[in-house]
Image (cartoon, rainbow, N blue to C red):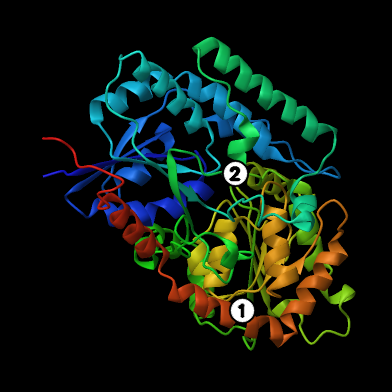
Amino acid sequence: MIDYKIFVFTIPASGHVNPLLPVLREIANNEQIEVIVYLTEEFRPKFESIGVKFKTLKNFDFVKMANLRPFDKSRYFELLDLATLSLKAISNNFEYIAKEIDQEKPNLIIYDTFGIYIKWAMEYYLKKSRKLIYKWPLPPMMGFSATFIYNEKIYPNQIEKALIFPYNFRFFYDLVRIFIASIRISVCHGISFINPMKHLKMKIDPYTKMILSVTFPELHPRSHLYDKAIYKFCGSTINEHSLIQMYSNQVELEPFKTLFDLIPAKSYKFDNDIKLILVSLGTLFNNNFNIFKKIIDAFENFDIINQNSSTNSSNLRIIVSTGDKCYEHFQKLIKTKKLRIKDNFYIVRSCPQIEVLKRASLFITHSGMNSTSESIHYAVPMVCIPLSEDQPAVAYRVADELGLGIRLDYTKMDFYDISRAVNEILNDSSYYHRAIIYSKLSMQCIGYMQCKNVIYKFLNDKDINFKINH
């Protein structure tokens, strides 16, 4: 018998979907709770495979609609552009979501804290409720943060703000666009104006009762200053068992099978004779050929740049996970012999990232929170090349403050900067000792279980919630 229903709204991007999956899998194991996820059709197989119901939002793939251009010498805050597109996309689904709430009668709505579009959809539902068109009371909401939690008094501070927000013409132009989009939606649908910046700041409102973070307390900046009754630092939601199943076919493919046979999985990687290095810029901003090319050049010239190093490039194995667009570009250059790469280079579309990190001595990363959490979990030091959104602040935290890597600025770096950063980490055991310390802290926090327990407690709090009336 179903006692509770939970609606889930997130962002159609792997970095936001993947941390949710282990949490929802745990909740779906409870026969008293039904979970319904609303997203684009592309993600149906992922969610249905963990036992939750899935329903499609029409024309909602705003991430693919975005013109995420390659990064060059200018900094962008792409979140504003994505948020503007999400508002336009969700307005087409207002009536559908309202009917779903009234008919399905959820007890809780969980939403991605970057998915501010949900606040407009809820305002539309309240408007219809006031007119008695829909009668089910709007349920309490819970934010799910796949990164650090924005709180004006705590995070970000002035240094972190300067890293996150470029304050250039493009930034202010996008700021105007999102306000215009909000005004237009308010006028067209007859709902109260909502200040988009208020919700980008993850402020607690009358309906959002709690925010869960997939970071553990020691990783999150100034976590001790947050109200523990509202903000829950649950830790990484990595579920190794489910990931092994997900990657089971890929690990048997080359080059992974040979590399995994050659390099065993272990926590302390400093003394590895053969050092495996993973390069990835994530799934959202990976259309950055020039950055990938600089990274490849850094290794092609490694022995020349680092002549006095005790590390030789012949002892390195480098996996470059590029995504589709850059992969095709690289393959074309290789086939036409315009690009030659050494035998220890492996350019791939995608990789079983967790299995690689278990063996990797270094991760060259865009510092997305998902990848960063995985790198910390498996004690892998990082060369951080943050691109946009929260990534510069994440890189600053893990590299500058925690000493888990080296941070580079993609607008200023050249290939020799990358090469020297790689050499420094590979030959300094202190990075690996610190990585082990934070890996142990991460593994102590079983994030998906902690999230599940918080949600269960919330549902059973009679002062907050109510069961479905049968």
Residue 339 in sight in this render: no
Measured as percent of width and height from the top left, residue 224 is found at 57, 68
Left or right: 17 in relation to 372? left
Q: Are the residues tagged 2 and 1 within 8 Å (C-beta)?
A: no
Residue type marked 2: Asp
Q: Quadrant of the C terminus?
A: top left
Depth-wise, is mark 2 or mark 1 nearer the camera?
Answer: 1
SS type, badge 1: helix
How packed mark 1 is, by other alpha carbons closer than 10 Å (few <14, some 14-19, many 20 or more), is many
Left or right: 401 in relation to 87? right
How packed mark 2 is, by other alpha carbons closer than 10 Å (few <14, some 14-19, many 20 or more), is some
Residue 466 vs 425, above or below: the answer is above
User: Can you identify the residue that label 1 sits on?
Assistant: 435
User: Can you identify the residue that label 2 sits on?
Assistant: 324
Q: Residue at x 76, y 72 (%)?
A: 422
Residue 342 vs 145, above or below: the answer is below
Between 276 and 261, the residue placed more toward the observer is: 276
Between 455 and 254, the residue placed more toward the observer is: 455
Kindly give the residue lying farthest to the front in the view shown: 463
Residue 266 in sight in this render: yes
Between 49 and 5, the residue placed more toward the observer is: 5
Q: Of marks 2 and 1, which one's residue comes earlier in the chain?
A: 2
Measured as percent of width and height from the top left, residue 385 is found at 74, 58
Measured as percent of width and height from the top left, residue 279 is found at 66, 61
SS type, badge 2: helix
Measured as percent of width and height from the top left, residue 294 is found at 80, 57
Say which mark, if any, is on residue 424: none
Image quadrant of residue 361?
A: bottom right
Q: Quadrant of the N terminus?
A: top left
Q: Residue at x 79, y 57 (%)?
A: 159
